[in-house]
Image: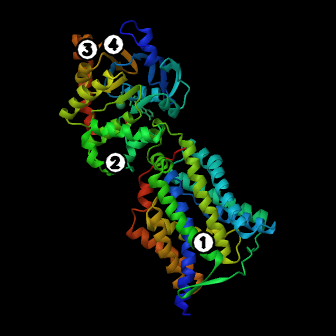
Amino acid sequence: MSIVGSSIGFGLITASILAIAAVGFTLQFGVTNILNLAYGDIMTAAAFAAYFATKGGAPLWLAAVAGSLAGAVLSVLLNRFVYSWFARRGAKLFAMIMVTLGASLVVQNGMTAVFGPDFVSLPTSAGTTYQVGPAIFTGPQLAIVALALLAMAGVHSLLRYTRLGQAMRATATNPDLARSCGMATNRIIDAAWLLSGLLCGLAGVALALNLSTFTTGTGGTFLIPVIAAAVLGGIGQPYGAMLGALVIGLATEVSVTVVSPSYKTVVAFAILIVVLLFRPQGILSEVAMAKEIAT
Amino acid sequence: MPTSSGNAGPAAQGLEVADVVAGYGGAPVLKGLSLTVSPGQVVAVVGPNGAGKSTLMRAITGTVRISSGIVTIGGVDITKWSSERRSRHGLGYVPQSRDVFDSLTVQENLSMGGYMLPKREVDDRITNVFSLFPSLLPLRTRVASKLSGGERKLLGIGRALVATPTVLLLDEPTASLSPELSKVILTEHVRRLADTGVAVLLVEQKALQALEVSDWAHVLVGGETRISGPSGEVLARRDIREVFLGAAALAIEASTAEDGKRS
Ligand SMILES: Nc1ncnc2c1ncn2[C@@H]1O[C@H](COP(=O)(O)OP(=O)(O)O)[C@@H](O)[C@H]1O
Ligand SMILES: [Mg+2]
């Protein structure tokens, strides 16, 4: 098997994990108008939840469910008790980004204080492997790819075709008008945090599985390519996020065949900069539009 | 049970604002305002820019805090209710600006108007809105931010109508429209809507047109009602035409430049 072939295989897994995370991120930012820099750290927290679940004897799938739920609950709580507290007191976009940066530091360092700085790992399955084209995948890896596709199609359908999803988009553009249409916007916002947090948690577990070892800083480091993928795809566009994830996932893994693996994040960062140069309508326009933060 | 004479019955069915004091945290903008809109009535509120007309609308919908006084709809005190609960109780609102969901299509905007109704009713009512405003029909898949000013306003009004409100607040619905379309909106749609039994509170800068189409009028200056009475009488008063409507007309000219901004 060629090196490029196998790195395309790795790239596909990386891309799928990125996609799950980026679809969640694009849903979260697109609906709540909060650029949540603690997203990566919630991913880490979810990975730890899954880790402790496996230590308690849970099978891997159950641990993944536990991790996803942890991501969902933590995201809702973070918004309810931290972000919306600041939003109610008038924090706007940039102030809010600082708040999320603070939350990121608190969550990450809090985890280091409680869980310690050591690398831990989720049990990797020694089960059967599957040959797909030039690459070989394990069962959990194939599940990750399937979940990524499901997340993309699910979030897209939610936002386009369901009343809740349309109400989320309506609340994002004009919360006052949404309320005068009878929408309980606080519950709609909660639902957005819950769903995006679920994907965030799932991505965290998948990331931990894929890396074989992880630590309290793992999710935070992963956030740069996640944001790059979401921006490349256009905020609020799940298919775009998936496409962005594919580009960045493949680019970072294939780059490993040319440059040192330690440059992976640098490659993602370079892509983010190129994206911002050529596609500034992604994130920059969202920020420049100074959209209200709905509470 | 509405009756054609007497004021307790019909008033209790429609909208009643009593001694409302409201504002944005500083000095109150509305300084003890009272008005009544019965079902089937159009009540106009006119007055110069900054008089507090939009603030009155926001106090009724619940986005501006009322520090004293009460608001009732259908005889029920809604003063302490959340915005969304008021709309569920039959209050419709077309704001002066930001009256549509920009990132949603025309069709999606209309279905958000019926957010609190059962799905199958929504479709029927959206069909009704399209027959009322046929020009929106070919635009149904267009994103609202790509509509012209007139199309936007029709969508904003249509969106509010999907919910079939019992009380409808219209904040300067004709501000961005051509004179012809303004006339159609006011004399046909607004009047006809009231004739179906809706209580309409109409804020207008085009004071003369508003007085012609309404049953009762309030002239609001500095957050207080200066003059109120049957529209025909208000229209006939020489001093009104000269002083207040003159001031309002001047204010229109002064403010057309900042059209579309929040006011
Ligand atoms: N969001 C706001 N915050 C603070 N003050 C406001 C706000 N909106 C309006 N005002 C003030 O309230 C007063 C009445 O404004 P408004 O109700 O918009 O008048 P009108 O609709 O009659 O032109 C003005 O002095 C205006 O500056
Ligand atoms: Mg106004």
Which residue carries the number 3 mark?
Answer: B240
Say whether residue B38 is left or right of residue A117: left
Which residue carries the number 2 mark?
Answer: B144
Say whether residue A35 is left or right of residue B206: right
Residue at the far bottom: name it: A1
Q: CA distance from mark 4 to mark 1?
A: 70 Å
Circle 3 SS class: helix
Rendering coords of residue A44 (x, y %): 67, 66
Q: CA distance from mark 3 to mark 1?
A: 73 Å
Question: Label 3: how many residues lie within 10 Å, few (<14), some (14-19) or many (20+)?
Answer: some
Q: Chain of mark 3?
A: B
On residue A144, the disc is 1
Q: Is residue A37 above or below residue B19?
A: below
Q: Quadrant of residue A20?
A: bottom right
Circle 1 SS class: helix
Task: Specify the amino acid type for callout 2.
Answer: Ala
Which of the two marks, 4 or 1, is nearer to us in this view?
1
